[in-house]
Image (tube, rainbow, N blue to C red):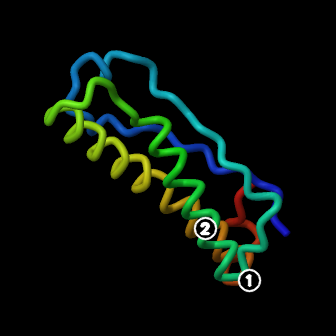
Amino acid sequence: MLKSLIPLALLPLLASPAFAQEAVPNIHIRVADLDLRQHADVAKLDRRIDSAAEKLCSTAPLTTASKITALRCRTAVRDSAKPQRDQLVAVANGNMLASARPN
C-alpha cells in the first residue's frame, strides 16, 4: 500500500485578480488508508479530491461571477491533481517503473 499524500496546488487560472495575488495554497490529501488497486478506493480518492477542491474554492457571497470563479477553480484543482492521482493508481497497479514512483 502506498503511504503518500497528493499535494494540490491551485493553478493561476482564476479570473479573480484578488485571488491571483494571494499565495498559491496547497492541500494534502491522505491516501495511506486506500488500496488504489481497488476501484472503490480509487473512487474514494476522487471524492477526496473533489472535497478538497470544494473547500479550496468556496466563495461567498454567491453571485454569478463568484459561481463561475469557483467552478473554474474547482476544475483547475482537479486538473492539477490528475497527474499525481493517475501516477499513484499506476504504481499501485504495478504499471510504473520504481524510479518513476512518487516519494
Question: Does label 2 or label 1 sit earlier along the sequence?
Answer: 2
Q: Left or right: 83 with respect to 60?
A: right
Q: x%, y% of residue 2?
A: 81, 64
Label 2 – label 1 distance at C-alpha: 10 Å
Split into 4 quadrants, where in the image is the N terminus?
A: bottom right
**Residue reaching furthest left?**
64
| Badge 1 density bin: few <14, some 14–19, many ≥20, Cα 10 Å | few
Residue 24 lies, with reference to residue 32, above or below; the image says: above
SS at badge 1: loop
Q: Relative to 43, is 58 on the left or the right?
A: left
Per the rendering, the mark at residue 87 is: 2
Q: Residue at x 49, y 54 (%)?
A: 50
Residue at screen point 65% across, 82% down: 39
Q: Is residue 90 above or below residue 7?
A: below
Residue 9 in the image, given as x and y percentages of width and height: 49, 39
Residue depicted at 49% across the width and 37% down the height: 55
User: Residue 59: x and y, percent?
Assistant: 34, 29
**Residue in the foreground of this view, choosing between 55 and 90:** 55
Instruction: Find disc 1 in the rendering and name its residue.
Output: 94
Q: Secondary structure at mark 2?
A: helix
Q: Residue flagged by tag 1: what amino acid is it?
A: Gly
